[in-house]
Image: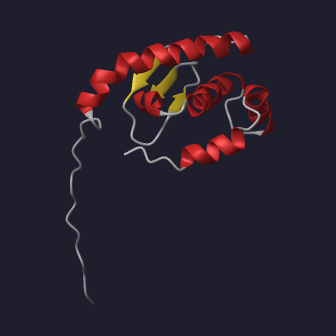
């Protein structure tokens, strides 16, 4: 019987991608995101918790059950239509914390072509 042993490698916590770029653009991204967030939360008549701008590897945005919103600083580099989709997507999670039919109906209220935009967004590499 042949035994193969694999050496267990400890993974180091990596520095955020493009640390310098992140620090340089974080506040600019925050200004743009907060502005659009205000516009859409007024439109949906909904409030949110804390807003964080992060340097995430795989996500454009996320929402916690507490109503806190996280956005990737790289939203700054996206076309405004794609950026607005991400913001609306996270706002809609404040109403529907899932991806069910009611959630997508909420998204469609302001982004009727969300399916096309979503496909376009998935084509963009984050790293």
Q: Residue furthest front?
A: 79
Quarter where residue 95 is shown: top right
Which residue is depicted at the point 48% across and 25% down?
A: 70
Q: Position of residue 17 (x, y in %)?
A: 29, 38
Q: Position of residue 41 (x, y in %)?
A: 66, 13
Q: Position of residue 6 (x, y in %)?
A: 23, 69
Vertically, is 61 above or below 41? Answer: below
Q: Residue furthest bottom?
A: 1
Q: Is residue 66 left or right of residue 2?
A: right
Q: Position of residue 97 (x, y in %)?
A: 67, 30
Locate the N terminus and report the quarter of the image it occupies: bottom left
Residue 68 can be seen in this image? yes
Which residue is depicted at the point 66% across and 16% down?
A: 40
Depth check, front residue: 104 or 73: 73
Which residue is depicted at the point 24% across and 40% down?
A: 13
Q: Is residue 112 left or right of residue 52?
A: right
Depth check, front residue: 69 or 112: 112
Which residue is depicted at the point 59% across and 46% down?
A: 120
Depth check, front residue: 63 or 35: 35
Quarter where residue 105 is shown: top right
């Amino acid at each position: 019987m042949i035994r193969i042993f694999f050496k267990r490698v400890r993974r180091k916590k990596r520095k955020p991608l493009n640390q310098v770029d992140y620090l340089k653009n974080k506040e600019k991204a925050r200004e743009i995101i907060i502005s659009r967030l205000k516009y859409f939360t007024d439109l949906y008549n909904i409030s949110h918790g804390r807003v964080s701008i992060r340097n995430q590897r795989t996500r454009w945005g996320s929402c916690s059950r507490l109503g806190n919103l996280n956005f990737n600083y790289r939203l700054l580099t996206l076309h405004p239509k794609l950026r607005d989709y991400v913001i609306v997507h996270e706002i809609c999670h404040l109403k529907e914390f899932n991806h069910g039919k009611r959630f997508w109906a909420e998204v469609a209220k302001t982004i009727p072509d969300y399916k096309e935009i979503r496909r376009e967004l998935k084509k963009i590499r984050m790293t």
